[in-house]
Image: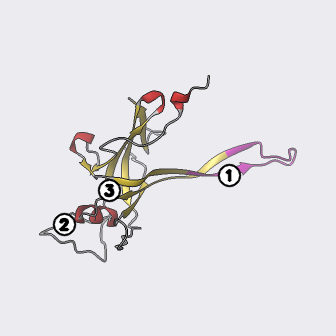
Amino acid sequence: MSSSTNIVVGVSASGTVKAGDYGAQESAATDLGFIKGGVSIEHEETSYDIKVDQVLAPIDKVTTDESLKIKFSLSEATLENIALSLGIGAPIGGKIEFGDKTDNMVKTLFINVKGANNSSRKYTFWRCRPTGKTGQTYKRDGETLIEAEFDVLPDMSKDRGKRFGMIEDL
């Protein structure tokens, strides 16, 4: 049955996006502060069509590729948030140095938003790698946003079918 309470508008009031070390619990994750423009969670699948001569349409499809990407813009232009979006270590002594990356930073992300029926919805993504695709624009008539983008990688320690993460209504 249709219900207007299933229509979700807005994000949560606080703690919308948190990042922790890989495998960390949410209580140990860092709140990344205010965001602007929402959170985008993009899932994509590629499939192979199984075709036979006797039928014109594919008789089945098999998934051959799957990816998940998370994107958001951080309103708090801290060095910590810039470092996270670049996929490098935390600032030391009020500065970050970067270039010629030799290792991959992996984080666990927690996204808290509104859910259907006036609930709260929690996304937990076990293993996320910042893509390094980021930007900051400093301008006279607007705030500086830090664009952050993460690829969700499968966590091979989880059961098959549960390797990207979890969504729960609370």
Which residue appears at 42% of the width and 33% of the height? 168
Measured from the top left, where is residue 145 in percent x and y? 36, 64
- Left or right: 27 as drawn, with respect to 126: left
| Mark sitting earlier along the chain (3/1) | 1
- Type of residue at label 1? Tyr
Distance in Å between CA atoms under marks 1 and 2: 45 Å
Q: Quadrant of the N terminus?
A: top right
Span highlighted in magenta in the image = 44-61
Distance in Å between CA atoms under marks 3 and 1: 30 Å
The residue under label 1 is 48
Q: Quadrant of the C terminus?
A: top left
- Type of residue at label 3? Val
Q: Which mark is residue 91?
A: 2
| Element type where label 2 sits in the image | loop
Total of numbered circles in the picture?
A: 3
Which residue appears at 43% of the width and 37% of the height? 167
- Type of residue at label 2? Pro
Quadrant of the rendered image containing residue 151: bottom left
Which residue appears at 30% of the width and 66% of the height? 103
Quadrant of the rendered image containing residue 2: top right
| Mark sitting earlier along the chain (1/2) | 1
Q: Which mark is residue 105?
A: none
The residue under label 3 is 106
